[in-house]
Amino acid sequence: MLNNIGLPGLILIAIVVLVLFGRGKISSLMGEVGKGITAFKRGVDDGKKELDTQDAELRDVTPAEEKDKA
């Protein structure tokens, strides 16, 4: 059903949404979507950093006593 929308259908949907919600509401909504995407990317990057630090700690299997002697 949604495979046959095409460009005219998308333009019509955009016009209807613009009429229903208004330009101000749509711009504020897009701003919130942008903030959400930014927060998501920041969370993914923080998660990767946390996993990398945990991975680095797990790789070092030398006992503390041997580290002091070296």
Image: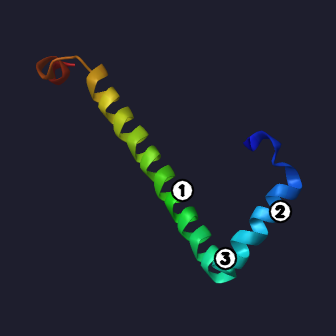
The residue under label 1 is which amino acid type?
Ile
Can you give x and y, in whole percent of width and height, for residue 58 in the image?
27, 23
Q: Nearer the viewer, mark 3 or mark 1?
A: 3
User: Mark 2 = which residue?
Assistant: 11
First-in-chain label (2 vs 3) = 2
Q: Residues within 10 Å of mark 1 (few under 14, many from 20)?
A: few
- View extreme (front): residue: 1
Binning the other alpha carbons within 10 Å of mark 3 as few (below 14), some (14 to 19) or many (20 upward) gives few
The answer to whether marks 3 and 1 mark residues whose Cβ atoms lie closer than 8 Å is no
Q: Residue at x 85, y 49 (%)?
A: 6
Residue located farthest toward the left when viewing the structure as drawn: 65
How far apart marks 1 and 2 lie (CA) works out to 25 Å
Report the residue at 30% width, 32% height from top: 54
Q: Quadrant of residue 26?
A: bottom right
Where disc 3 sits, the SS reads helix
Give whichever of discs 1 and 2 has the lower sequence position.
2
Q: Residue 20: which numbered mark, if any?
A: 3
Three-letter amino acid code at disc 2? Ile
The residue singled out by tag 1 in the image is: 37
- At x 67%, y 81%, the residue is 22
